[in-house]
Image: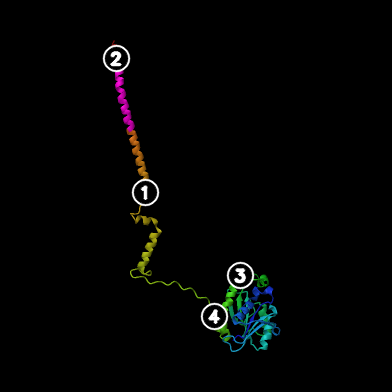
């Protein structure tokens, strides 16, 4: 079982919200969950809380935040572990991890230090690398030269929330850590969120074709083809008038009316001309008769 939980970080308000203090954030959350209070203990060079009644435990556990700065974290851890006879495999170090993206975490026992100065000093002071590690992903800046400044800066709010989400999820595995079932704790921490279930297919109602049947497939294909071709829809519906037909009828009627009016006007003009010609012809004949009569005298 885990008897000593160590969060790695740097003391001071200027470092409180920086990426390098992710381990401190974890211990703060754990202490709140247990109702414990971290207090300065100069014997162990850090903030310490002893919890005697943690659920599922048969003895006390300790929470520790070294106040020695990151590079000397082992000084604080080794002092407390030796005094209370806590073996390296009963220690969990919670720390920030450059090689894991924000929102992800890894749980393992032993291994190298990956260039992390807090882990490096713990290995040196304990004389062993067999302690457990909970690695909280903070991401990598992309260039090695930028790492020092990167870990000592505050993460954007979205990244901080991802890290906090991991902290919350890892708390679900704490009971297994306290009971000594560390393989189950590992499985819980590494578990992926369940995939969403596909929507449930409702059974077809009586008289409706089954969507999975070949006939329904052909019917659906025919419907899709018909819907995709507006011209076929018009051809299949003789009763549906063409949108241009009313306008064409109106134009034809207007032209017919105009032609009829023109014909009527022409007939009237011809009749008028005929009448005028008839009325002037007798007068002309009378004039000629008078002329002839005069000439004979």
Q: Nearer the viewer, residue 162 or 144?
A: 162
Vertical arrangement, residue 273 with respect to residue 196, above or below: above
Circle 4 Cα neighbour tier, 10 Å, few/some/many (<14 / 14–19 / ≥20): some
Find disc 3 in the rendering and name its residue.
157
Could you tell me how many numbered marks the image carries? Answer: 4
Find disc 4 in the rendering and name its residue.
188
Dominant SS type (magenta): helix
Q: SS at mark 3?
A: helix
Residue 123 in percent (x, y) is at 66, 83
Q: Nearer the viewer, residue 209 or 206?
A: 206
Is 7 colored magenta in this rendering?
A: no
Distance from disc 2 to disc 3, alpha carbons, whole Å, reads 128 Å
- Left or right relative to 15: residue 226: left
**Quadrant of the snapshot with the C terminus:** top left
Find disc 1 in the rendering and name its residue.
246
Is residue 190 something that shows in the picture?
yes
Does the CB distance between marks 2 and 3 fall below 8 Å? Answer: no
Q: SS at mark 4?
A: helix
Q: Which residues are magenta?
A: 268-291
Residue 209 in percent (x, y) is at 35, 68
Is 280 colored magenta in this rendering?
A: yes
């Amino acid at each position: 079982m885990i008897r000593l939980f160590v969060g790695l970080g740097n003391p001071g308000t200027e470092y409180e919200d920086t990426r390098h203090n992710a381990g401190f954030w974890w211990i703060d959350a754990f202490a709140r969950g247990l109702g414990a209070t971290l207090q300065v203990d100069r014997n162990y060079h850090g903030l310490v809380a002893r919890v005697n009644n943690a659920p599922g435990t048969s003895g006390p556990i300790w929470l520790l935040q070294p106040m020695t700065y990151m590079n000397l974290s082992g000084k604080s851890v080794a002092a407390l572990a030796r005094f209370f006879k806590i073996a390296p495999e009963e220690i969990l170090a919670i720390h920030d991890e450059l090689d894991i993206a924000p929102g992800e975490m890894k749980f393992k026992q032993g291994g190298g230090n990956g260039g992390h100065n807090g882990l490096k000093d713990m290995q040196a002071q304990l004389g062993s690398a067999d302690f457990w590690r909970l690695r909280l992903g903070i991401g990598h800046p992309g260039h090695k030269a930028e790492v020092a400044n990167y870990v000592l800066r505050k993460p954007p709010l979205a990244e901080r929330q991802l890290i906090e989400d991991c902290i919350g999820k890892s708390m679900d595995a704490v009971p297994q850590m306290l009971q000594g079932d560390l393989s189950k704790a590992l499985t819980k921490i590494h578990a992926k969120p369940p995939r969403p279930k596909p929507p449930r297919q409702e059974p077809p109602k009586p008289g409706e074709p089954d969507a999975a049947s070949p006939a329904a497939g052909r019917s659906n294909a025919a419907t899709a083809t018909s819907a995709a071709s507006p011209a076929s829809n018009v051809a299949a519906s003789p009763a549906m008038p063409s949108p241009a037909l009313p306008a064409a009828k109106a134009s034809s009627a207007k032209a017919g009316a105009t032609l009829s009016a023109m014909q009527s006007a022409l007939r009237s003009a011809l009749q008028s001309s005929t009448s005028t010609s008839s009325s002037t012809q007798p007068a002309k004949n009378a004039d000629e008769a008078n002329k002839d009569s005069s000439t004979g005298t």
